[in-house]
């Protein structure tokens, strides 16, 4: 459904992303991995239309720059690393805004079925009890769950996660990834996520893009990409064994239910 | 089922009633007070087009106070909704026409129009209004692009700093214009503190029309403003056309502030204080915040105008003195408490 062709990003004479091409199909969970400064977030920023790029990004065969903003939001949803918030909106109000792309223009009101999507998203993320609470009073994990619920209410065909659990604890990471895994299985949608933890990529991903210094080193199914040879060439040390050891932490209880 | 996000019709009726009661009260009170009954009957007869008695009360009420209070109400409503919209758009509780320098920009435009006699044939005061709008928009563009250059997140500190610098710059330009303006000095001084003492029914029609158009535009952007108030990036992610909405809101705001300034001069802090206080009651959702700010702004400015008329009666204070006095104290309070909140 998504295809990037010869994607490059330059800031002045600095090349951040150099001629990267990849494709994402239905029901795939593509993990973008690589060391710091590899250009992982740059790929995500280009796809979610935040950053300027050269090359082409096609979504269902059409250039993403030709989509109207609401049309694009119905196809691509983004969960950012951290969303700084200003005013005391309630959890419910924030999640409800996830339905914005379906409201059709500035003057029209809610479309039918919005309430069900919001309820379902609140339930999946375990936020029903907190729905009236101000987002300013939430913990980091609860706030990130609120934005996860928002993007689930948005019901995109492709979900993009830019290290959404980066500053949160292990339990939360595990719950979030298990929840998203269930979501892919239920809805048949696709996910692209940037991750640092290779064991996390291996445990949940179906495909991977291994990046290094703005270039794509390897891409394809997880076992073909995260090989000892590939990883050693990128990280300059043997991280393969370490990844396999860490893998066990993700293995039990992938129920996808978050505590309330 | 889902409950509605905005106010109910009954609430709107109550708001309207509050504004009308304040209006009647402000028309009655003053250096010469006229009984409520006489005032209401005079206004009622005037509306019906019935014959009016030739009394002092009639002259005071219908020719002086009524147009003035109507203008004050609309200016208050305009400044207030503009402040609320900008505070949402920039996710910054200290944003307002005065703190951002938009009002100063509009003043330069209005003063240039007076000093150089810019006019549009056929429309009385048209030149001043148009110049005020154009300069308000230019000021807003200059301030925001400078702020973006320094700090693309448009943080509170950057915007306030640049707003202050711009206001000082505008002040020096205004002083310069005053020096060269000669005969026009007196009418120019009026812009710098704000006063609605000379308001006519013509002014009232101008501001009412501008308010109707711009407020409708801003109200239609309530949902988008909610998204901006959470975060601009989040707004983009959920499908808001960020650039277009920003441009629409900024144009509506500068047009409305421009018209307000061309009629009432620079009236400080209304757009800062009223939305802030309203938000404490309604919460940050713009579907409630924007309409509530309109009514609260109208009531507040009508009362502030009354204070400016009667406190040193028969002398009259510029209304800007009253609002700035209340406003600057509230400003300090907001600034300190929002600082503390961020730890």
Image (cartoon, rainbow, N blue to C red):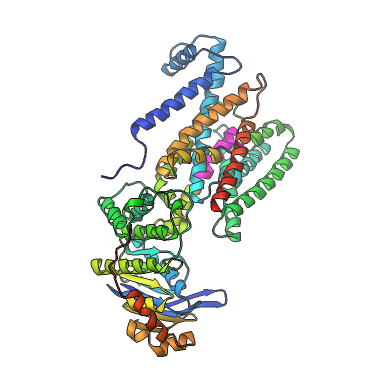
**Image quadrant containing the N terminus of chain A:** bottom left
Q: Residue at x 60, y 46 (%)?
A: B336
Residue nearer the viewer, A174 or A124: A174
The residue lying toward the viewer, choosing from A169 and B191, is A169
B265 within the magenta span: yes
Left or right relative to B168: residue B125: left
User: Can residue B333 be seen in the rendering of this structure?
Assistant: yes
Considering only vertical position in the picture, is B74 above or below A18? Answer: above
Q: Residue B88, image x and y in percent?
A: 48, 48
Find the residue positioned furthest to the bottom.
A229
Q: Quadrant of residue A44?
A: bottom left
Residue displayed at 53% across by 22% down:
B26
Looking at the rendering, the stretch of residues picked out in magenta corresponds to B251-270
Location of residue A172 in the rendering, given as x and y in whole percent from the top left corner:
38, 65
Q: Is residue B226 above or below residue A60?
A: above
Q: Is residue B298 left or right of residue A101?
A: right
Look at the image and tell me in which quarter the C terminus of chain A lies. Answer: bottom left
B25 vs A207, left or right, is right
- The main secondary structure of the magenta stretch is helix
Q: In terms of depth relative to the viewer, which is nearer, B74 or B10? A: B10
Judged left or right of residue B322, residue A9 is: left
Residue A204 percent across, percent down from the top left: 33, 75
Residue A17 counted in the magenta span: no
Residue B299 drawn at (x, y percent): 50, 29
What is the tally of numbered marks visible in this picture?
0
In this view, B209 is above or below A252? above
The residue positioned 43% from the left and 44% from the top of the image is B286
Q: Is residue A204 visible?
A: no
Between A251 and B70, the one lying in front of the other is A251
């Amino acid at each position: 459904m998504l295809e990037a062709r010869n994607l490059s990003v330059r800031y002045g004479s600095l090349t951040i992303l150099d001629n990267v091409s990849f494709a994402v199909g239905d029901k795939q969970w593509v993990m973008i991995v690589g060391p710091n400064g590899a250009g992982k977030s740059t790929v995500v920023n280009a796809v979610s239309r935040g950053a300027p790029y050269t090359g082409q990004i096609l979504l269902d065969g059409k250039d993403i720059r030709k989509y109207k903003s609401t049309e694009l939001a119905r196809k691509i949803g983004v969960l950012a690393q951290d969303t700084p918030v200003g005013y005391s909106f309630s959890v419910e109000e924030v999640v409800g805004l996830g339905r914005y792309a379906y409201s059709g223009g500035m003057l029209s009101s809610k479309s039918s079925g919005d309430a069900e999507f919001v309820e379902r998203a609140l339930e999946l993320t375990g936020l029903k009890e907190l729905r009236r609470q101000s987002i300013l009073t939430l913990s980091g994990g609860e706030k990130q769950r609120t934005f996860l619920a928002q993007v689930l209410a948005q019901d995109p065909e492709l979900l993009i996660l830019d290290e959404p659990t980066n500053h949160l604890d292990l339990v939360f990471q595990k719950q979030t990834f298990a929840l998203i895994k269930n979501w892919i299985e239920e809805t048949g949608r696709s996910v692209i996520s940037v991750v640092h933890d290779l064991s996390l990529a291996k445990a949940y991903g179906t495909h991977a893009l291994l990046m290094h210094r703005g270039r794509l080193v390897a891409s394809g199914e997880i076992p073909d990409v995260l090989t000892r040879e590939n990883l050693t060439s990128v990280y300059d040390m043997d991280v393969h064994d370490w990844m396999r050891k860490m893998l066990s932490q993700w293995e039990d209880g992938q129920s996808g239910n978050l505590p309330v | 089922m889902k409950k509605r996000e905005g106010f109910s019709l009954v609430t709107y009726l109550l708001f309207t009633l509050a504004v009308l009661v304040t209006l009647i009260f402000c028309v009655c009170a003053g250096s010469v007070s006229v009984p409520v009954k006489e005032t209401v009957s005079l206004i009622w007869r005037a509306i019906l087009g019935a014959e009016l008695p030739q009394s002092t009360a009639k002259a005071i009420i219908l020719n002086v106070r009524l147009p003035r209070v109507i203008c004050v109400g609309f200016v208050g409503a305009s400044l207030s909704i503009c402040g609320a919209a900008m505070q949402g758009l920039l996710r910054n509780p200290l944003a307002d026409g005065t703190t951002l320098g938009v009002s100063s920009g509009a003043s330069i435009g209005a003063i240039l129009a007076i000093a150089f006699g810019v006019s549009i044939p056929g429309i009385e005061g048209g030149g001043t209004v148009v110049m005020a709008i154009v300069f308000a928009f230019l000021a807003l563009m200059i301030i925001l692009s400078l702020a973006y250059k320094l700090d693309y997140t448009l943080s509170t500190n950057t915007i306030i700093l640049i707003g202050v610098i711009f206001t000082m710059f505008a002040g020096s330009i205004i002083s310069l214009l005053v020096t060269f303006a000669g005969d026009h000095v007196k009418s120019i001084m009026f812009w710098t503190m704000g006063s609605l003492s000379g308001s006519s029914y013509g002014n009232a029609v101008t501001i009412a029309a501008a308010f109707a158009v711009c407020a409708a535009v801003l109200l239609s952007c309530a949902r988008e403003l909610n998204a901006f108030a959470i975060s601009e990036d989040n707004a983009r992610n959920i499908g808001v056309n960020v650039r277009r909405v920003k441009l629409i809101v900024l144009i509506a705001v500068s047009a409305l502030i421009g018209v307000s300034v061309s009629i009432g001069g620079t009236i400080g802090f209304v757009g800062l204080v009223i939305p802030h206080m309203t938000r404490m009651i309604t919460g940050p959702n713009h579907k409630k915040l924007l309409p509530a700010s309109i009514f609260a702004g109208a009531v507040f400015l009508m009362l502030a105008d009354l204070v400016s008329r009667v406190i040193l009666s028969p002398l009259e204070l510029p209304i800007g003195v009253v609002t700035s006095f209340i406003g600057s104290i509230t400003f300090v309070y907001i600034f300190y408490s929002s600082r503390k909140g961020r730890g």
